[in-house]
Image (cartoon, rainbow, N blue to C red):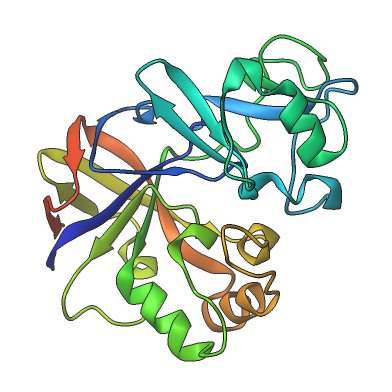
Amino acid sequence: MDGRVAALWRYPVSSLGGERLEACVVDAAGLAGDRAWGLADRDSGETAFPESKRRWRPAPQIRARSAEDGLKLDFPDGSSLPAEAAGDALAAHFGFAVALRPHAADAAETATDGPLKPRYERHPIHLVTTASLEALRAILPGSAIDERRFRPNLMLDLPGAEGFVETGWIGRAVSVGDVRIRIVEPCVRCAFTTIAQGGLPLDPAVLMAVTKRNATHFGVLCTVEAPGEIRVGNAVRVLD
């Protein structure tokens, strides 16, 4: 099955909105700069969990993006600030003091400074197809079904594919330009898919439909077997 890369996304700060890219270097850890940072309560050290804790729910309304002079945060009011100068704006947005901290796999669970333990232990590439989005739109014609709800790294368009097609690719390899990835497991969804963000309303029906129609799976998680650069428009082939 052949296709192309329809969109490429990176999320410099876990839980915040991401940035749509034209190209990105990919290695064993995934897209360069993806989920390198996290959010935590500055005083308690609690990690941001918008899907389960209401006070963190405004997180994806802020967009994180990489710039030549460092990480930038774009706020719903149209302001844009360097991450290191955004403390007051983050506190105003959430209603409590928030710290932006780098991720490290060996970080302590409860530390209030230093590196932050990642929210999930997960495979580094998240892949979704346009076929899955169209399948969900057909199920929920009254909902705003948008890729941002599902936070993929790779959005693939494969002409002729129908339904939640990538769920059936577990164990297979995919060539993406010169990069080769291996599909390891389905992506189990949570309430993050329902959260309001960037013009998308709160919509619990999204998670209910994915749960009922595809066993709570939407998209797949992948490892990187051959690194390189991925660009929008790259040829894609599902192998094996």
Place residue 2 in its image quadrant: bottom left
**Front one among 216 and 25:** 25
Q: Residue at x 56, y 89 (%)?
A: 142
Coordinates of residue 106 in the picture (x, y in percent): 63, 15
> Is any atom of residue 160 visible in this view?
yes
**Front one among 153 and 141:** 141
Up-down relation of residue 200 to residue 125 (above or below): below
Up-down relation of residue 97 to residue 209 (above or below): above
Q: Residue at x 59, y 37 (%)?
A: 79
Q: Residue at x 61, y 41 (%)?
A: 75
Coordinates of residue 121 in the picture (x, y in percent): 58, 36
Q: Residue at x 68, y 45 (%)?
A: 59
Place residue 86 in its image quadrant: top right
Q: Is residue 9 left or right of residue 77?
A: left
Coordinates of residue 27 in the picture (x, y in percent): 29, 27
The N terminus: image quadrant: bottom left
Up-down relation of residue 210 to residue 28 (above or below): below
